[in-house]
Image (cartoon, rainbow, N blue to C red):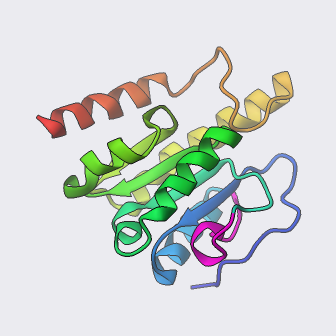
């Protein structure tokens, strides 16, 4: 698998994704998925450099179980970053950690993949990419801006309902 590298000048019509994981192999796996969906990859500054990335990241790919194994302060840094830059988070988690994820991360900016295969993320990532390009083309918006056309309202509603049932 190829090493993660920063894309120093991501193309204007290409959003940036940053895998945030507790181990390098998992980080490379998530970066590979993002590349398949045509995202520019930004190195995980939260874990490796203990700072924020220099490039604004549109989508954070967060592997929660690996972060909870020794990198828990990273979650508060990610949540603060998302609040400042209006980024979104795609969270891989298991049922054991779902409640903790809901407590630590801003739900309105998260989409949760619970006990899911990595390939289950592709429809969300591609859909997010298409909506971002459409918004940028029509209104000059950043990738992560939410306009009146929220193409993922149904997807988020279903995700929230599933998480609610999981908590019961």
The image quadrant of residue 8 is bottom right
Q: Nearer the viewer, residue 135 or 24?
A: 24
- Look at 78% across and 36% down and name the residue there: 142
Tally the numbered discs: 0
168 vs 129, left or right, is left
Q: Name the quarter where the C terminus is drawn.
A: top left
Seen from the viewer's position, the closer of residues 12 and 59 is 59
Q: Is residue 129 magenta?
A: no
Residue 56 placement, left or right of 162: right
Nearest the camera: 96 or 129? 96
Q: With 51 as the anchor, is 28 left or right in this view? A: left
Instruction: Give the residues drawn in magenta, as a range.
Output: 38-51
Which residue lies at the image location 63% right of the left edge and 49% below the top edge? 81
Residue 100 in percent (x, y) is at 29, 50
- Residue most extreme to the left: 168
In screen coordinates, is 52 left or right of 160?
Answer: right
Give the residue displayed 44% in from the left and 42% down from the top. 111
Q: Which percent across, then down, holds residue 155?
A: 42, 30
- Above or below, comparing residue 167 to residue 69 in the picture: above
Q: Quadrant of the N terminus?
A: bottom right
Residue at the outermost top position: 148
Q: Position of residue 33 (x, y in %)?
A: 54, 64
Against 83, residue 59 (above or below) is: below
What residue lies at 65% left-to-right and 57% top-to-bottom? 17
- 87 or 50, nearer to the observer: 50
On the image, the x and y values in percent for residue 109 come to 52, 37
């Amino acid at each position: 698998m190829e090493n993660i590298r920063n894309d120093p000048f991501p193309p204007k019509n290409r959003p940036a994704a940053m895998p945030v994981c507790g181990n390098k192999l998992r980080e490379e796996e998530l970066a590979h998925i993002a590349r398949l969906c045509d995202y520019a990859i930004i190195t995980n500054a939260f874990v490796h450099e203990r700072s924020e990335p220099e490039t604004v990241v549109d989508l954070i790919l967060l592997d929660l179980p690996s972060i909870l194994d020794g990198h828990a302060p990273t979650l508060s840094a990610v949540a603060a970053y998302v609040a400042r830059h209006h980024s979104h988070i795609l969270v891989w988690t298991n049922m054991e950690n779902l409640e903790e994820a809901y407590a630590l991360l801003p739900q309105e900016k998260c989409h949760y993949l619970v006990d899911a295969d990595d390939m289950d993320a592709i429809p969300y990532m591609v859909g997010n990419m298409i909506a971002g390009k459409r918004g940028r083309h029509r209104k000059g918006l950043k990738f992560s801006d939410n306009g009146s056309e929220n193409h993922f309202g149904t997807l988020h509603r279903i995700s929230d309902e599933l998480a609610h049932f999981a908590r019961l």
